[in-house]
Amino acid sequence: MAKTSGKTSSNPRGRRPAAGGAKRNAPSPLTTLFGGLKDLMKVNFDNRRIPTLIGLVLAACSLFACLALITFLFSGGSDQSLIYAARDGEAAAELGREAKNILGLPGARLADYLFNQLFGWGIVFALSYVVYLFAHLIWRPRIAPYRYITNFLINGFLLLWVSVAAAGLQSLFPSDSFLRWGGLRGEELFTYIYRGIGIAGLLGVLAFTLLIFAVTCSSRVLSAIQNPKVPKVPHVSVPRPQVGGFFSRLFSRKKKGEEPQSEEEDESYSQDEDAWRDEPPMPTDDEDMDVQEEDPTPYVVHTPPTTTTATTAHTAEAAPSATSFSRTTTSEPSDVPEMIVEEAPKDDLVEDGDRTAPEPLAPGIQLALYRKPTIDLLRDYEQGGTGIDMEEIEYNKQKIIDTLASFKMNVTPCKATVGPTVTLYEVIPESGIKVSRIKTMEDDIAMSLKSEGVRIIAPMPGLGTIGIEVPNSTPQTVSMRSILASRKYREQQEKMELPIGIGKTITNEPFIFDLTKMPHLLIAGATGQGKSVGLNALITSLLYSKRPEELKFVMVDPKMLEFSIYEEIERHFLAKLPDAERAIITDMTKVVATLNSLCIEMDNRYRLLQTAGRAVRNIREYNEQVRSGALKRIDGHEILPYIVLIVDEFADLMMTVGKEVEQPIARLAQKARAAGIHMVIATQRPSTDVITGLIKANFPARIAFKVFSMVDSRTVLDSPGANQLIGRGDMLFYQGKDMIRVQCAFMDTPETEAIVEYIAQQESTGSAYELPEYIPEGEENGAKGFNPNEKDSLFDEVARMVVQTQVGSTSNIQRKFNIGYNRAGRLMDQLEGAGIVGVQEGSKPREVYIKDQATLEQLLQKLS
Ligand SMILES: Nc1ncnc2c1ncn2[C@@H]1O[C@H](COP(=O)(O)OP(=O)(O)OP(=O)(O)O)[C@@H](O)[C@H]1O
């Protein structure tokens, strides 16, 4: 073939012959014949027909030879006379019997020739090469030609080596067997070497050539020579799926019914020389070599002692259990021989006993008998824990390596971390591979693993590896109970102001963050991907850590169903506008007033912080001062509750009232942190008209559940990733730095109902927390006048006190009448409306316009 090409290339087709030289340069009939043959072969090779035909012929031949040889081993002795008779020209019939070989006399003669006349036991390697040839010609014709040559050389070497060694052995242990162990050719070669260098030399040659062969072909032998110290470790064998030589892969594919059905389908497998996406590529010659010499124990699990330690309440503090696998594939460079499989630490739960104990009474605590909900109200969904499925891990690892290798990206796996729903495989790419190229392989790996969504983190921040997250075939449900009962949550609860335990990370650790540090949160995700469950987890987390005096929610629920369950705890944990009937806001037009009211509350709080002195810069410091007694209740100071605004469907809000909410939300987002007001807004539609630039800029902390497009993912997270999630609470947490994949905790409606009931039946603050009244700009003038219907019952008394003391201060009213800050603020507004005091000017007391009691009494009479 090569020769043919050489000849034709001297007259490349398409080149015009020189003028006048047409005859001289006309192709000879031989060239024409070869050229035609070449064209024919080319076309047919492209069609894969010729290789398949050749492969089938070779398959038939090798089957014939194998059958002949196998029966020859058993019946060859009795067929010897027939074989020699035939060779001497006598007919078998003359000897009066038939050959015992299953293929008759031709089979016996062929086997005798192959075995005895050629290479004895070495012939096995000749046959194995023929099998390799036909298998590749039929099923994988496009592998590079050098692979045929490499395999030929390997089998050729083994054939000669075994042949000479077998001939030597037979000469040492002579027998009257009809079999010539090394065959005639092997015996000749043996005799030649033996005569030249003697038996010691012969043994030396055999040993040395075998060593050279092993070093050339096996990276394991090479590394064993380079690092002779092999650590002694206990080992347990684990069955290995999908790893092995060509035949095991072939059979496993058949078993799974994945054989390409049609020629077209088959063609698609061979688009790229190595790109068998649906199956690992055929082993390269190197792989074949290693597979041949692999230990029959597929792979070894090294179990460090840490894995066997008993689970105690302190397991989280113990080192994570780790199981390391010896290298099983030659795709890996020899210097990183093991992959660590890291199972997440077991849940470290603490007893709930202390929860039911009465809380120590402290200044600011009004509800002395109030108890936070107990853990037994929550269910445990995590039966069985996150067990490691070694087979799955090994299978996925192999698939990842093979898929990347088929695109010429060799990687070494170094670690697998098994999480509740996802396993993170860390790999190190061979030098020279662009990390950005691996990043583009998400879909290819997902396809080869037949997996829903694969996410590649390239590179893993600070680790020098590339992370490939693959969903587990049996995801675990993370229960809210396991988060709130965890030691970590209990510890963080002490340190954080608004601790939110929302789920578990990939290392199975509770993921807890402080809402005050965010300080606002944007949640997005397509419908049905776990947003509502996530919001409930967030609310529950706060209900478990805060008392009614410390926390109030403002809930906006356009779906009208999601938060209605929390209505029962209105008197404990909800805040509302003074004129609102229900605390849960379902009417979108009321949201604008609520947001503006929150802005007023924010401003009021800032003023209050100013009056508290220089040492107080935010609500935490203010509350600390109140708790410590430095700021006294008698002076109108009391614990300021954190306010958390939760909007379930922000898109609805934007569609209904649009810009009107955008402004107050942006204002709150920019300023409300110090005043203890935090926002959580969730949306099903993460489009740019909902999550506008203004909103995005003010919500640095974001949670993305699964979205359906990369564009949506970019809108939420500024990068792809959320589109690769698998749903059912699988989420990405982003706070301007790295993205953290978290499995959101699950809790069902009955659990929420039980918590709400538990709180509702306890003592409360009497009514919902009253937010300041908001008067829209247009109505302000009229309303400022004074509305007798809204007159506070304390109005007259307060007015008298203000005129008498000539001090127009809200905190003064609070102190004197022992009322809350908001009510005092509202009374002050009414005094302003009635013309008794002037407008607010910074943190100074207001000017009192009425100077004597008589004038005041006249005015009060007019207003009544
Ligand atoms: N963390 C989780 N663990 C397990 N399953 C979950 C989890 N979160 C959600 N699911 C499953 O997904 C379903 C839908 O969840 P959810 O109602 O929270 O979605 P959603 O995003 O709020 O949808 P929508 O926007 O349409 O209301 C749940 O009924 C539950 O079966």
Image (tube, rainbow, N blue to C red):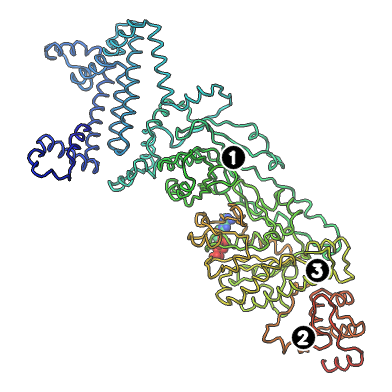
Q: Nearer the viewer, residue 728 or 810?
A: 810
* Disc 2: which residue: 790
Of callouts 1 and 2, the N-terminal one: 1
Query: How many marks overall?
Result: 3
> Callout 1: few (<14), some (14-19), or many (20+) C-alpha neighbours within 10 Å?
many
Q: Which quadrant of the view contains residue 704?
A: bottom right
Which residue is denoted by mark 1 in the rendering?
Answer: 342
Label 2 CA crowd tier, 10 Å (few <14, some 14–19, many 20+): few
Q: Residue 42 at what x, y percent from top left?
A: 21, 41
> Which residue type does callout 2 highlight?
Glu
Label 3 beta carbon less than 8 Å to ligand 1: no
Disc 1 element: strand
Q: Nearer the viewer, residue 834 or 42?
A: 42
Q: Is mark 2 within 8 Å of ligand 1?
A: no
* Side of 487 relative to 240 (left or right): right
Left or right of residue 188, residue 223 in this image: right
For marks 2 and 3, the one nearer the N-term is: 3
Image: 496 above or below 761 = above
The image shows residue 318 at horizontal and vertical percentages of 69, 39
Q: The residue tagged with tag 2: helix, strand or loop?
A: helix
Q: Residue at x 24, y 43 (%)?
A: 46
**What amino acid is labelled 1 in the image?**
Glu
The type of residue carrying mark 3 is Leu
Q: Is residue 742 visible?
A: no
| 203 with respect to 57 (left or right) | right
Q: Which mark is residue 609?
A: 3
Q: Quick one: SS at disc 3?
A: helix
Q: Report, in whole angstroms, how far the alpha carbon at label 3 lies from the one at label 1.
A: 49 Å
From the viewer's perspective, is the residue at label 2 or at label 3 nearer?
Answer: 3
Residue 839 pos. (x, y %): 79, 83
